[in-house]
Image (cartoon, helix red, strand yellow):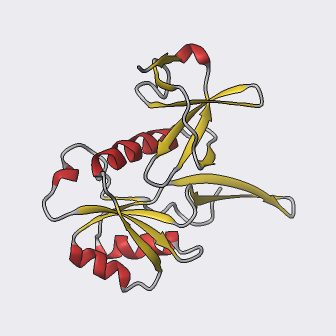
Amino acid sequence: MPILKEEPSLYPETLLDAGLADLPGRQWLAIYTKARQEKSLARELWRYRIPFYLPLVRKTNISQGRRRTSMSPLFAGYLFLFGTEEERIRALTTNRISRILLVENPDELLFDLRQLHQLIASNAPLTVESRLAPGQKVRVRSGAFAGLEGAVLKRRGETRLLVRVNFLQKGASVEIDDFMLDPIE
């Protein structure tokens, strides 16, 4: 059981829903934070009411015979901000940002983030994947991941579904059965 209550990783809760991403004057930014500052930046953005998404996953460690559970960023150093120019400047004043990357294709990023959010919400054990290579594109036919699109990976004899965030060239994979997948042309 965690000692601290879970903090928001998505503000507002409807940020990834359809329609909200079309607000005028707002753009998606990929924020690369200073070392281990992702959650601190998220807390400050939440306090300023600036829309953001920080993909967090539950990690369990055993230390000195005790099981400790924490929420860790899926992509170390990255947070996604959906804001105006004033909100971008406000975020920079936190002194927790190393670099800001402008998102060239916001629709593709939003699609990727929605899928990633659904994958995290399933509480399935995820593996972070970096520097992605092209693979067979598939769509999940049934089960908890129905409707998700990704690529198939084979690792140590198991089939995994890879959901990408193409902008970062990173992704997360989860074990899945072949019969649940349909190829995409």
* Image quadrant in which the N terminus is located: bottom right
Find the residue positioned furthest to the right. Answer: 64
In the rendered image, the vertical position of residue 58 relative to residue 153, given as above or below: below
Residue 181 at x, y = what percent?
A: 51, 18
In the visual, does 150 lie left or right of 63? left
Q: Which residue is depicted at the point 29% across and 81% down?
A: 89
Quadrant in the picture for residue 73: bottom right
Find the residue positioned furthest to the left. Answer: 24
Residue 161 at x, y = what percent?
A: 57, 31
Residue 107 at x, y = what percent?
A: 28, 46
Find the residue positioned furthest to the top. Answer: 179
Residue 134 at x, y = what percent?
A: 54, 35
Q: Which residue is depicted at the point 51% across and 44% down?
A: 120
Q: Which residue is depicted at the point 20% across and 51% down?
A: 20
* Image quadrant in which the C terminus is located: top left
Any part of residue 113 in sight: yes
In the visual, does 169 lie left or right of 91? right
